[in-house]
Image (cartoon, rainbow, N blue to C red):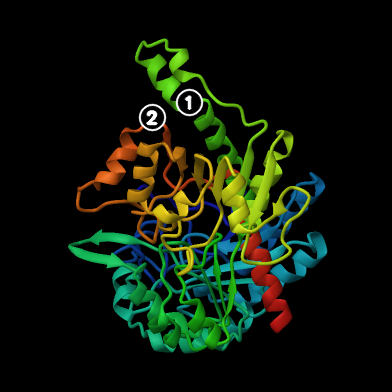
Amino acid sequence: MATFLFDKIIFGPVKSRRLGVSLGINLLPNDCKLCSFNCIYCECGWNPDHYEQKINFHPKDQVKESLFEKLSLMKANNEDLDVITFAGNGEPTLHPEFSEIINYTIEVRNQVFPQARIAVLSNSSMIHKKSVFEALNKVDDNILKLDGGTEETIINLDQPVGKFNLNNTVELLSKFDGNLIIQTLFIRGEYEGKIIDNTTKEEIEAKIADYNGIVIRSRFKIDKTFLDKAVNLQFIARVGAGLESIDCDYAEQKNIHLIAAPEGNRNAVGEQALGMLLSLFNNLNKADREVREGKWIREGNRGYELDGKTVGIIGYGNMGKAFAKKLRGFDVEVLCYDIQPMVGDANAKQVTLEELQQKADVLSLHIPWTPETDKMVNADFINAFAKPFWLINTARGKSVVTKDLAEALQSGKVKGAALDVLEYEKLSFENLFTNGSTPEAFQYLLDADNVLLSPHIAGWTFESHQKLAQVIADKSRLFWERTC
């Protein structure tokens, strides 16, 4: 791994994804790393095996002068500044005059850039010192490292210089009474013959008792065992729409608030559902493949028009409503069915399931995976439709019985299927099969010209990536403000 050292007291500013426009302060020597940890991933490399001479920290007066000069220049040039960040060539709190430097930084910040925050990136090794603890409590972003839930993992990953006790560190962190940001670099790999992995569920369970909230993605499962260890947990937020990876009933029994973010990717889901439907109607994927193979087949790719059709939507929440909104530009009748009453709107008329099955030419699923929706689209469900229909599923794969769908495609009862999700997906949505075998029904889908497949990417856009995170941040903040 390429490493580097900062050769000045003041560096930047740089654009940080999490902090914004950041001006860095390096309190450590310019010619070597000086840290109480020797993290195997550190951008500054390794501590020297030994120091040839007495370590010369940057004098506080020199730091003050350099900082004031840089801030004044930025102000004169009308430059933006979001944060002044103590980082650099090692652990900033090792500086013997750290607390005095923090006091001056607050003073000059207030004079020149009063809107800017002050941040410290620290490995927590010096918070036992009263002066360091008090100084960190004064800054806006007190960002402290805790790279694992077990002492063994932290020692292997961070390689502390001297003794390290995880319980003591956690106890000291708790004394900040929430005025801190815990920073963890999640890593999985091998170093000097040892497997190092702080992403396991066991690692998270080992430290979850100290946390009031957790934000997860789809591959992390929260079960009863996890929740019993999360004694202080007040909310669980999932960056996505579904909550099936969480034992919701048990979480609610423990008065843990559940947060999802369907607002973040509903537009993307609606666009993909419409795109898949139009592609299916007009044989676009099949036609594209044939042209690439040198085949120019027009009659065999004659398509259907959406105008005049009846589109049925099952599940009229965020995703269903987004799809119905996209259909407004077409001359179609849109019907919706939902277990909740009074959810219909100007874009879709709410009807019974029986009426939807009588009228629909197209069925689009926008339902969560629950005991009620598991294997819902089976042979009986399909045969209850009065007309042959097209099926779109951008919701959850386990709601459709693939074997029954394949048989309906062969018989013509289902005229075509656009599937972004599959029955065979793992709960993490990361892959399909691990044993190399392909079920016969799925092989039929792979070979069929009237089937369109994608790997669970409805809602997986560049825009939704940002919107999902923002929705989760906003909802989590709102919950915290209301409860604290």
Q: Nearer the viewer, residue 48 or 387?
A: 387
Which residue occupies 36% across, 85% down?
165
* Rendered image quadrant of residue 22: bottom right
In the rendered image, residue 6, in percent from the top left (x then y), is placed at 50, 53
The residue identified by callout 2 is 449
In the figure, is residue 464 to the left or right of 393?
A: right
The residue identified by callout 1 is 283
Q: CA distance from mark 1 to mark 2?
A: 8 Å
In the rendered image, residue 409, in percent from the top left (x then y), is placed at 39, 39
Question: Split into 4 quadrants, where in the image is the C terminus?
Answer: bottom right
Q: Are marks 1 and 2 in contact (CB under 8 Å)?
A: yes
Amino acid under disc 1: Asn
Q: Nearer the viewer, residue 345 or 22?
A: 345
Q: Is 285 located above or below residue 263 in the figure?
A: above
Amino acid under disc 2: Asp
Q: Is 161 located above or below residue 328 in the figure?
A: below
Residue 113: numbered disc: none
In the figure, is residue 349 to the left or right of 276?
A: right
Q: Nearer the viewer, residue 28 or 182?
A: 182
Secondary structure beneath label 1: loop
Could you classify mark 2 by the number of other residues whose Cα lies within 10 Å: few (under 14), some (14-19), or many (20 or more)? some
* Rendered image quadrant of residue 148: bottom left
